[in-house]
Image (cartoon, grey):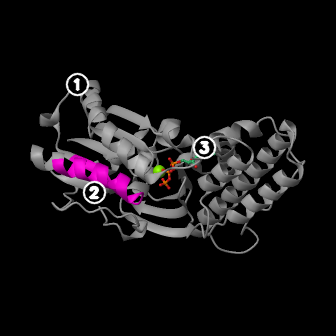
Amino acid sequence: MRILGIESSCDETGIAIYDDEQGLLAHQLYSQVKVHADYGGVVPELASRDHVRKTIPLIEGAFAQAGCGPEDLDGIAYTAGPGLVGALLVGTSIGRSLAFGWGIPAVAVHHMEGHLLAPMLEDDKPDFPFVALLVSGGHTMMVKVSGIGEYEVLGESVDDAAGEAFDKTAKLLGLDYPGGPMLAKMATQGQAGRFTFPKPMTDRPGLDFSFSGLKTAAANTIRNEGDDEQTKADIAHAFQTAVVETLAIKCKRALKETGIKSLVIAGGVSANTELRQKLERMMLGMKGRVYYPRTEFCTDNGAMIAYAGMQRLKAGQHAPLDMKTKPRWPLDSLEKV
Ligand SMILES: Nc1ncnc2c1ncn2[C@@H]1O[C@H](COP(=O)(O)OP(=O)(O)OP(=O)(O)O)[C@@H](O)[C@H]1O
Ligand SMILES: [Mg+2]
C-alpha cells in the first residue's frame, strides 16, 4: 500500500510518499523560517498563505522523486491537528479534496502522533511498549505508548514547551528565530559551572514540566550580566544543561514508574546533541535503549504523517468527507489501531 502524507500544521510544508513494503519513496520539505524571521515568531496568516503556495508544487515534486503518480496511491494522510487553524485548513482541504477527486480514502492524522511514531521510519526501531518524550516547539509531553493509538499521557508542560523556552531564551541572547539550534551551538562555546539554573519541578513527585521559570531565570541573568559573547555562551550552556537534566530526570522517573526499558525522544528538541548524549548515557546505566528519528525527522515533516496515516489506513480508519481541523486535539483521545 502507498500513501501520500501532507503536513501543514505550523511553519513547514512537508510532503512525503510512503510505501508499507518499500518504505519512504519521497520526502519534500519547505521551511517558512525566512518568512517569519523578521517577526521573531510564526505569523499565522503568512503561514497559511505560504502553505497555499507550496503544497501542490511539493506534491508534484514528491511524485517526480518517487517515480509514481496519483494512480499508484491507496490513500492520502493529512495533519488535521493540533496546530494553527488556517495552516491546518490548507493541508486538510488539499488532502481531502485530492483524495475525493482521485477516489481514494483520506486519513486525518494527529500531528503529535506523527512525531511520536517518527522513529519508526528508521531501520532500528523500538518495540511496544515504550515511553516517549515529545519535546517540540508547542509541546512537552511524557507518553506511555502501548501500541498505535494507545497513548497514556503521563505528564506535560504546565506552561511553556521546551522548544518554546529554547526559542525565547535564544531571542534574549540576540539570536534569530527559531533560536533553539543556535542556542545549542552557542552553548558549545560556554563554560560549564559559571552559572547554574534551576531544574523546574524535579524536587517534587510527578511527571509534569514547567519551563517559564527557567526562562525567567535566564532572562534575569542575561539582563544583569550578559553583555559579552563569552558570558552569553556561558548562560546558553547553563540553560541547556538545566533543560537537558530536567528532561532526563523526568524520563528516568517515567521509565521506573512504568517498568519500561525503551525510551523514544521525538519533536524538534530531540535533535539536541546534549539531550541525546545525556539520555544515551542514562539508558546504558539503566540497561535500556533510547531511540530517536534522524535529525531531519525531528522537526515537522511529511514522512511522519505519511507513516502514521499508513498505520490507520491499513486498519481501515478513514476520514469522513467533511473537512474538519482540530486545532486542539488531546493525544489520548485517539482511536486504537
Ligand atoms: N538542536 C536543537 N536544540 C534545541 N532545540 C531545538 C533544536 N533543534 C530544533 N529545536 C527546537 O525545536 C522546535 C521545533 O520543533 P518542531 O518543528 O517539532 O515543533 P513545532 O512543530 O513548531 O511544534 P509542535 O510540534 O508542538 O506543534 C523549535 O522550538 C526549535 O528551536
Ligand atoms: Mg511539530
Query: If you read the primary sequence from the N terminus, does the residue marked by circle 2 or circle 3 appear first?
Result: 2
Q: Toward the viewer: 319 or 217?
A: 217
Q: Position of residue 324 (x, y in %)?
A: 26, 63
Q: Could you say which quadrant of the image residue 60 lies in? A: top left
Disc 1 versus disc 2: distance between alpha carbons? 25 Å
Where 80 falls versus 155 (above or below)? above
Element under label 1?
A: loop
**Which residues lie in the magenta part?**
76-97
Magenta-colored stretch includes residue 104: no
Residue at image point 82% right, 51% down: 222
Magenta-colored stretch includes residue 91: yes
Q: Which mark is residue 67?
A: 1
Tell me if the residue at label 2 has its CB under 8 Å from ligand 1.
no
Rendered-image quadrant of the C terminus: bottom left
Element under label 2?
A: strand
Which amino acid is tagged 2?
Ala
Q: Position of residue 232 (x, y in %)?
A: 82, 43
Q: Can you see residue 77? A: yes
Q: Could you say which quadrant of the image residue 56 lies in? A: top left
Rendered-image quadrant of the N terminus: top left
Dot 1: few (<14), some (14–19), or many (≥20) neighbours within 10 Å? few
Disc 2 versus disc 3: distance between alpha carbons? 30 Å
Q: Toward the viewer: 317 or 46?
A: 46
On the image, numbered disc 3 is attached to which residue? 177
Element under label 3?
A: loop
Query: If you read the primary sequence from the N terminus, does the residue marked by circle 1 or circle 2 appear first?
Result: 1
Which amino acid is tagged 1?
Gly
On the image, numbered disc 2 is attached to which residue? 108
